[in-house]
Amino acid sequence: MTKQIQAVRGMNDCLPNDSGIWQWVENTIRQVVAGYGYQELRTPVVESTDLFKRSIGEVTDIVEKEMYTFADRNGDSLTLRPENTACCVRAGNEHGLLYNQQQRIWYMGPMFRHERPQKGRYRQFHQFGIETFGIEGPDIDAEVIMLSARLWKVFGIAEHVTLELNSLGSNQARANYRDALVGYLLERKECLDEDSLRRLESNPLRVLDSKNPQVQEAIKDAPSLMDYLDDESKHHFEGLCSKLESLGIKYTINPRLVRGLDYYNRTVFEWVTDSLGAQGTLCAGGRYDGLVEQLGGKSTPAVGFAMGIERLVLMLQTLELTSQVPKPVDVYVTALGESTELYAMTLSEELRDISSTLRIQTHCGGGNMKKQMKRADKSGAPVVVLLGENEMQQQTATVKFMGGDKAQQTIPKSELTNIINEYFEH
Ligand code: ATP
Ligand code: MG
């Protein structure tokens, strides 16, 4: 037999059984961002490699070992986007959306990182994110966090996530801190792994982001960035904290939180959960006031976050919070007996003409009552319309309500929509 071709490792199909929850999650997210007046920005999944090198940073996990980079047929180095903030800034600069303006942007789509696939970590994964430009904050920092907090409320997982917050301060503050951190790490060199030793030379703050437990233990008592904050950043951070408190959004300050990308300054945050095992970060973001300029635009303050949709879906499934996911079929229309097929089809079309929201599946392929009812059952439709030769001759329909104790009834076909709508309204 011919060998079957399989999907690329770490890249998943979203099967019909799962696409319902995905669509529900995506639609709910769209509703939430609309409630804040954000607009969507869609960018290509492929960008120039330089875009990510210059933004995320040469000495980061993503750029060092996770990017899908290839030469196209012209020999240009291209990369499948590993994240979307850099792409939004690139597009914003290119189309003049940023300088001297305010923008509130959202995006959703696939990202690509060559990581070791495991639960909650894939090579093609999906992010929803928001980016705001042109507002110095901290009011907008609070809005960005508030929007994420609303998502947790809407999805019913607010009790299962906690907010960790830190400030990275100005470039100068980080430079001062860097010296203190290097001093501390040099005294503990024997506890550092190969990556961390290299980073100690090239980008010491990255050591704080290490996932290696031994390294994490070693940096437990490292000097705190908080003690090195410049006055303005401190003021900004206090402003954000007090706003979050007034808004009733709980947080903990985590002075080790630096995030895995180099472009952040001041506010950084992560929403973490213990419902996902090792992949505990659901959503992460922060301020990146230098990035627009770094990518060739005029200096523009910015703040945003990205959330992993696979991790959110996984959480909703684990916590069994999927009851709001709509069933794919509302009404299953059977065609029993000879020559009823056309009656079933036209009647289904009439129903669709009247109601654009009802999901109606018409039985195809014939078969006896038992077979058709089995299909109806499998479709999950709460309402089944039984159409036999009697119904066809008298232009009626028999309606059966699955589950519950509402009696089956035969009615003129003109009354069908009313009865079905009435049923779904209750
Ligand atoms: P992690 O610490 O889990 O590696 P990260 O710091 O690399 O995350 P970001 O680049 O900040 O993650 O991306 C934001 C969010 O995107 C993460 O919090 C996570 O929910 C999701 N995410 C990141 N990488 C993956 C991946 N490989 N597979 C699935 N989701 C991911
Ligand atoms: Mg990562």
Image (cartoon, helix red, strand yellow):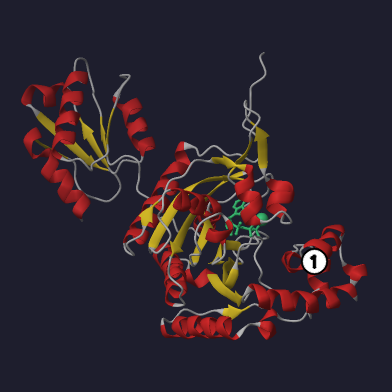
Residue at 69% x, 79% y is 225
Q: Residue at x 79, y 66 (%)?
A: 213
**Residue beneath disc 1:** 213
Q: Look at the picture and state if 208 lies above or below 407.
A: below
Which quarter of the rendering shows the C terminus?
A: bottom left
x, y percentage for residue 419?
A: 13, 45
Q: Quadrant of the N terminus?
A: top right
Disc 1 within 8 angstroms of ligand 1 (CB) = no
Is residue 337 something that shows in the picture?
yes
Q: Is residue 129 above or below residue 17?
A: below
Q: Quadrant of residue 341?
A: top left
Q: Residue at x 65, y 72 (%)?
A: 171
Which quarter of the rendered image does ligand 1 occupy? bottom right
The answer to whether residue 116 is seen in the rendering is no
**374 lies left or right of 241:** left
Mark 1 element type: helix
Q: Which percent across, then down, holds residue 287?
A: 54, 68
Outermost residue toward the right in this view = 190
Q: Is residue 44 left or right of residue 370?
A: right
Q: Is residue 294 left or right of residue 408?
A: right
* Nearer to the camera, 342 or 167: 167
Q: Give the image quarter of residue 385.
A: top left
Residue at far top of view:
1
Q: Residues within 10 Å of mark 1 (few under 14, many from 20)?
A: few
Q: Could you tell me the amino acid type at mark 1? A: Pro
Image x and y of residue 29, in percent = 40, 56
Left or right: 264 in relation to 95: right
Residue 149 image position (x, y, % from top left): 45, 70
